[in-house]
Amino acid sequence: MSDNDESAITRLLYRYARAVDTKDWDLYRSVFTDDAVIDYSAHGIDAGSREQITEYMSETFSAGVAMSMHYITNVEIELDGDAATVRAMFYNPTQLVFLKHLSYFGGYYFHDLVRTADGWRSRHLREEAMWSENGPRG
């Protein structure tokens, strides 16, 4: 794997985090291919298309999330030509509007990436929640 691929893929993950944390849904869309499947079922959200999940995130984050800050670490990349699989850890302090204290979430992101004319994009994201503290479900 070239340093350029590793750097570009890591920057894509950081762009994902910035998009969610700043609630920039056009930037969020730019992380994914048009036909991407996004799976947040670990949080009780049905997997869906890029547009379905973007709409859900836009509504949910506008109404219920005052602040979030995603940290993405331990990025592991397996490159196979113009495709890549990625496993990365996340740590996410979040201020939910209906809770007095911060909530904290941790787990893994699993991405299937593809190289496009516009650079690396995720065609499938699955989030695996490993732990939470003061989350909405206790």
Image (cartoon, rainbow, N blue to C red):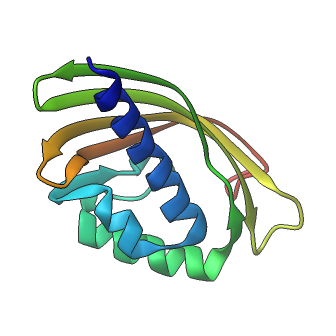
How many numbered marks appear? Answer: 0
Task: Name the residue located 30 percent from the left edge and 53 percent from the top edge.
Answer: 38
80 is higher (above) or lower (below) than 129: above
Q: Nearer the viewer, residue 23 or 126?
A: 23
Question: In the rendering, at what x and y percent does residue 24 appear?
Answer: 48, 73
Left or right position of 135 against 72:
right
* Residue 91 figure quarter: top right
Q: Where is residue 136 in the image (x, y as percent from the top left)?
A: 69, 59
Q: Is residue 37 left or right of residue 130?
A: left
Measured along the vertical axis of the image, is residue 57 above or below residue 2?
below
Query: Can see residue 117?
Result: yes
Q: Is 13 situated left or right of 93 in this image?
A: left
- Quadrant position of the N terminus in the picture: top left
Q: Residue at x 15, y 41 (%)?
A: 115
State the image coordinates of residue 69 (x, y, percent, origin top left): 67, 54
Relative image position of residue 86 (x, y in whole percent) = 34, 29
Up-down: is 5 above or below 14? above
Query: Looking at the rendering, which quadrant does residue 95 occupy?
Result: bottom right
The one nearer the camera, 118 or 69, is 118
Camera sees residue 47: no
| Identity of the residue drawn at 89% across and 67% down | 100
Residue closer to the observer: 13 or 99: 13
- Residue at image location 15% in from the left, 31% down from the top: 83
Instruction: Relative to 1, say whether 97 is above or below.
Output: below
Horizontal arrangement in the rendering, residue 82 relative to residue 103 (left or right): left
